[in-house]
Amino acid sequence: MYGVILEGGGAKGAYHIGAYKAIMDMGIEIGGIAGTSVGALNGAMLVQGEYEKAYELWYNMTYSRVIEANDEKIEKIKNGKMSRSDIKNLAGAIKGVINDGGLDITPLRNLLEEVIDEEKIRNSGKDFGIVTVSLSDLKPVEIYIEDIPKGMLVDYLIASAYFPVFKKEKIDGKKYIDGGVYNNLPINLLSDKGYKDLIAIRTHGVGRAKKFDTKDLNIIYISPNEDLGKTLDFDSETARRDLQLGYYDGIKALRKLKGYKYYIEPKRDEEYFLNTLLNLGEDKILEIGQVLGIENVPYRRALFEFIMPKISEILGTDKENDYEDIVIRFLEILAEKYDIEKFKIYSYDEFLDIVKKQYKEREIKEDNGGILAKVVKKVDFLSALNKDETTLNIADIIF
C-alpha cells in the first residue's frame, strides 16, 4: 500500500493530476495522500475518488476560476496587447487589490464548495493530511482529516493554499498562510502514519521542502525536468501541457524508463553502450576531444579520463548515471533539435532509428558537406553560453 505526497506549487498543480493518472494506470493501490497548498486541494479530490473531476478542472483552468479576474484582459497583459485605456484600468485594478489587501479568491472558495465532498473524504477509508501555518498563533499546523472540525474542510484547504498575495480572511477566528512556507513536501504526514512506500510528486514550487530522515522509506519521486510555468499562471494551455508532462514523467518514474526529456525503454546492456563509444574510432574520439579542448592525448585515454568526465559535467548527470544514460542524453539533444515527438514511449532502437533518419535527411539538405563539417569547432565547455552548442556538436559527431 503506497502513500502519495503532493508538493505545493500553485498553478503547477496540473502536474499532480497527470502523474496520478500514471499511478492509476500502473495499478498501484493508494492508502493515503498528503499535500500542501495546491497539493492539499488536489489531494482532497483524489481521496474522494473523483480523478475525472480533478482532470476536467485543470484541463479547463482559467484565472477566473481561482481569483476575481477578467481572463480576456489577463491575456492582453500577457501578450503585451494593451491599449492606453487598458493600462489605465490595470493601474486602477492593482491599486484596488492593494487597498483590499490582496487578490480576491472568492471564485476559488466557490469552486471548492462545488467540487469537494467532505463526507466522501471522511468515509473514503484513506488517510489524508494537509499543512498550513497559523499567523495568529505563529506556528505550523499539520493536520489530518479526522482532526479537522466537521464542516470546515474547505476552510482548511483554503488555509493551506493562502498564497501571500491572496486576500486574507479569518478561519475560525484565526489568520493563516500557505503551508509551503513551513513544509511544502509533507513526507512526514504519511510516514508518521506508518507508510514505508511513498510516491512524492514534485513541482519545485516556491516553498520549503523540509528535510526528513528517509533512510527507512522507499520513496519514488516523480519530478519534472522542465519548467511547469509560473505559480499564478492559471491558464488552460499551460495546465494541459503539465497534465501530459505529469503523466509521462509518472510513467517514466514508475517503469524506470530512461531519458531526460524523452521516455525510452532501457536496453539494460551496459556493454553495448560502452562499445558504442569505443566503436566511434580514433578519429571521432579525437574530434570530440577537440570540441572539448582536449588535445595531444591518446584517444582511449582521452575518452575515459577526460572526455567522459567533462561530458558528465556538461550534461549535469548524476554520478550513478551509466553509459546508457549518457548516450541517450546525446540522442535526446538531437531529437529536440529535430522536433521529434516527445510524449511517446520509445524503445532504444526505435528512438535511435528515428534520430538517425532525421539526421540523414537534414544532412542531405546541407550545401557544404553536411552538419558535421559545419558544427565541429573548439569551444569553452565550461561556458554557460556555449554549453548547448558544445553538447549539440558532440551529439552530431557521435551519431
Image: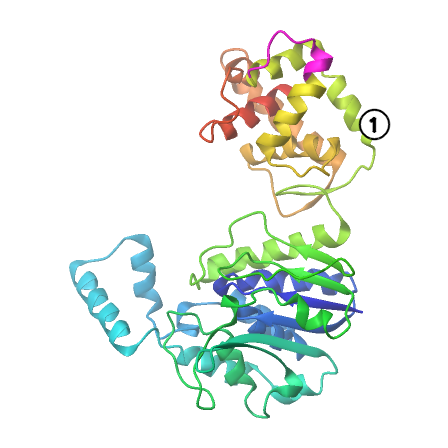
Residue beneath the point at 68% across and 56% down: 221
Q: Position of residue 203 (x, y in %)?
A: 56, 58
Q: Is residue 87 above or below residue 382?
A: below
Q: Which residues are magenta?
A: 293-302
Q: Position of residue 346 (x, y in %)?
A: 72, 42
Q: What is the three-letter code of the residue carrying label 1?
A: Glu
- Viewer-side residue, 344 vs 275: 275
Residue beneath the point at 52% across and 18% down: 375
The quadrant the C terminus occupies is top right
Badge 1 element = helix
Q: Is residue 49 visible from the viewing direction of this image?
A: no
- Viewer-side residue, 150 vs 341: 150
- The residue sitting at the top extreme is 296
Is 231 left or right of 86, judged from the image as shown?
A: right
Q: Which residue is mark 1?
A: 271
Q: Is residue 64 above or below residue 136?
A: above
Q: Which of the 4 quarters of the picture holds residue 315?
A: top right
Q: Is residue 311 visible from the viewing direction of this image?
A: yes
* Residue 110 on the magenta segment: no
Q: Position of residue 20 (x, y in %)?
A: 67, 64
Q: Does the magenta stretch mainly form a helix, a strand or a loop?
A: loop
